[in-house]
Structure formats: C-alpha cells, structure tokens
Amino acid sequence: MGGYRSQAQIVEDAVTTGNGRPRPPVRRWKPRPVERRILLFLGDLVAAWFAWFLANLVWMWAGEGSISLILWPRFFATRPGWFYLLPFLWLFFMVEMYDDHRATSWEITKRGLMVASLLGVLSYLVLYFYLTSVEQKYRFLPRISVAAFLLFTVVLTAAWRWFYIHVLVQRYFDRRVLVVGAGRNGRALWAWLRKATAHPYHLLGFVDDDLARQNVQIGPFRVIGRSVDLPHLVAQYAITDVFVAIQGPIRGELFQALLDLQAMGVEVSHMNAVYEELFQRVPIAHLDATWMLRDFMDASRKTVYYEAGKRLLDILGALVGLVLLAVMTPFIALWIYLESGRPIFFRQERVGKRGERFQVWKFRTMLPDTQRERGHWAPEDQDRITPFGRFLRKTHLDEFPQFWDVLRGKMSLVGPRPEQPELVALLEEKIPFYRARLLVKPGLTGWAQVNQGYVGTLEETRTKLEYDLFYIKNRNLLFDLYIILRTFGAVLGARGE
C-alpha cells in the first residue's frame, strides 16, 4: 500500500537511486556559448559547400545540357582551383557575423548577408576584369556558376541562420542554472547574466548557507536553499549548471556537495570562468591579488612552438603589409600633402614588451599645427582630425607603417595596442593588473580592437584591459588568425574609430 507521500519523499525518490546515491538528472541537448559558436560556423560551412555543389550542377547543366551522374566525377575533377575556394571566401566575408549579439539578431543577420553577397559580387568583378585584361582566354569565366553560387549560398545561409535564431537559441535549449552565493558576488553574477546578450543560461535561483539570506529576493529570484539541498534542487529544477559566486576558500561541506553534483553530471563553474565565457574577457574587478600567480601566469605561458609559429606569421604578414604600403604610400602621401601639407608621417614613443620603449610611425591624421599633449586618449583629438585622416583611421590605413616594427620584432601582428609611456604610468596606478599586458609584444591589431575599438575614458580602458588579458591568457595561432580575419572585416567595412 503506497499511502500518503510527502513532497520531501517525492523529491527524495527523484534524486536518489535504490542505493541512496544521487541520480543523474535527465538531460536534453543544451549547448554552451562556445558550442553555439562552433555549431553556427559548421552550419555556415555546410550551407556554403552545398551551395557550391548546386552551383556546379547549374554549371554542368549550362555546359552539357543535362545533369548526368556519369559525368559527375570527371566534371568535378576538372573545375578550376579557385572555384573550390568560394565556400571559404564566403566564410571570410561572414567573419563579422560570429559575434554573439550579431549572430542572434535576425535584422543584423539580414544586413550581414547583404554585405557579404555584395563583397562577393565586387570580388568577382575585380577578378574578372583583371584576368580578362591579362589574357583573352579568361573572357569566358563562369559568370552563371558564380552567380548561382552566390544565390544558393545567400538562400541556404539565410535559412540556416533563421533556424539557428528562431529555434536553436530559444528558451527550450537554455541551460538551467543555480548560483551558489547570494552576496555581492552573486548579485554581480546575476547582473552579468542580465547584461550579456544571447547567452544560453536560464537562472532559477540562489543557494546560500547564511540563514539570514534564506528566501531573500534578488531581483526576480530568491534564495531557495543551502548547500546541503543542492542534490535535491538539481533534480527538482532539472539544473544543468551550478555557478559558484564565492571568492576565496570554500567550506568542506559545500566542496563535497559540489563534487556530488559533478558526479551527477552537473557542470560546476566559478563565476570568473562564466564571465570569460559570456564576454570573452576577464573580470578584473572581481580578481584577487593571487589570481596573477594562480591562474593567469600558468595559462599565459606558451610553448616555443607557438612563439616560433607566431613569429613566422608576423614575418609573412609584415612582408605582405610592406608591399601594400609601398604601393599605397605615394597616393596617401599626395592626398595628405594636398589636404594639409607636411609632414606626411607622425612619430610617437610607445611602450612595448616588458616596458621597452620604441618609436611607432603612422600616416598623419591630424592637422599639422596641432601637437597632441602626451598622456591622454585619442578621442580628445577628434576636432583636430582631418577629413582624410578620419578615413585613414576608419580603414586602419594610418597604421600600415607599423608593419616595419612588426618585421624588426618590436611589434606583432596581434597583441595589445602599444600605449604612450605617460598613459601606461597613469593607468598602472588606476587599474589593477594593467602592467600584465606588457608580458607580450604589442600588436597592430588585437582582441580589444576588434571588439571595442579606440577608448576615451578610464572605464573603457578597464574594459579594453579585460579583452587584452583574455587574449594573453588564451592566445594561440588559431585565435591570432581569427583576430586577423576580424580585422580584415573591420577594414572592409570601414569600422575603425
């Protein structure tokens, strides 16, 4: 006879197996932020390659008059090599659309697809007119197949992105979260989740061992239990993640409860790791003095193979950049001279790796009779920038002379931007961990630049440092290449500041 069963008994049966051990909760597929980004990229890749395949069928039909399975092997084997690069070129044009905010906005996605398709058409026209001017045989370049590729790619990518936005990032696939710690750090973590766009986390409540905080309301949530209640709460609310919002030592009872949750398949993350995952930067306002030794220094130490690969990438990139600089300099110099006279270049002292000082050169973008006061931010000079100088800054062409500093090893293609010595001294006093950005060579571009651009206030500089430290901690060659591609996207879109 079953008899009456209390709510506590029902929960007990739900969370334990027959031998009293915690029962793993039932799971649905719930991707984390990084998994969402990978899924988005793979979907775009599949759409681009399927569009390439369809474009080949159109090409076959236009040339052979039919689509025959017998002809497929020979036909695909004889396509020109550049045609195989079209899917990768499309992904390059879409590189700016992998930002979390852009990726989850249908309006921004539609604009991004239009820009990518326009860049594709312009690229083909440049290729077509260049090749046909070189050799007459190229006048029969496959216009129909390229047009078919662009059409199919736009349609298939739009369909995939619509499915991603309207299905895969909806509440059903959100990860269900409890936060351990309802104090200052717990409230900060809740504020991060509110601020972040398009994150996959659905907060359900807080857990805290302080009896005075039980049932306390924090925004729309409340403290619903203590650490001993965690296994029951995980099963009751189908929790997938527990975020620990506690800085410093963790009591033994709570530590054991967290280990039990991991045995149940629940992912346990510290609030600092959650911040990095959400914003792809480090939370310097919530880091203690031991973070530099405990976490940052070990993670930022890289192998000699990475350093050698990065240097090789720097040399190759600098050589290409210097060739482009040689081609562009006469035209840029003439325009600067006609608009505002001489000098053509601007020189300034900057701080590099380990505090070493060196001179950087840029194309002059400000009026020649205005001398920037040392030790303040660029936005204070906005009224002194020439019209052509504004264009140079937006396209980052003013930075091209620094390829010489990359070649001679004072800078890298990717890294924190070098600052003036006076600013470095000031910011080291105002912002904790600021000097840590000098552990690596400064870069022509960087993670902070592609996400934030130029800064003009102390708070913006603090955010920029968070991006820089995230890059230093997580840098690798793939990350460097991604930043370079994002920089190309910014240059093509003239999004510099």
Image: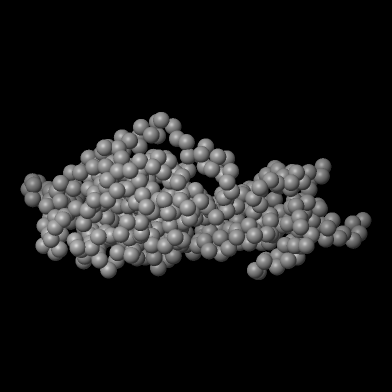
Residue 351: x, y in percent? 35, 46
Count numbered badges in the picture.
0
The answer to whether residue 280 is above or below residue 297 is: below
Residue 112: x, y in percent? 35, 62
Q: Is residue 54 visible?
A: no
Between 189 and 370, the one lying in front of the other is 370
Between 116 and 343, the one lying in front of the other is 343
The answer to whether residue 352 is above or below residue 28 is: above
* Residue 175, quarter of the rendered image: bottom right
**Residue shown at 46%/61% (left/top)?**
459
Quadrant of the image containing the N terminus: bottom right
Q: In the image, 195: left or right of 80?
A: right
Residue 196: x, y in percent? 52, 61
- The chosen color scheme is one colour
Q: Is residue 230 visible?
A: yes
**Residue shown at 40%/40% (left/top)?**
354
**Residue shown at 81%/53% (left/top)?**
12
Q: In the image, 338: left or right of 495?
A: left
Quadrant of the image containing the C terminus: bottom left
In the image as oriented, which residue stretches furthest toward the top? 304
Q: In the image, 140: left or right of 20?
A: left
**Residue shown at 51%/39% (left/top)?**
297
Between 317 and 375, the one lying in front of the other is 375
Between 287 and 1, the one lying in front of the other is 287
Residue 418: x, y in percent? 35, 48
The answer to whether residue 192 is above or below residue 131 is: below
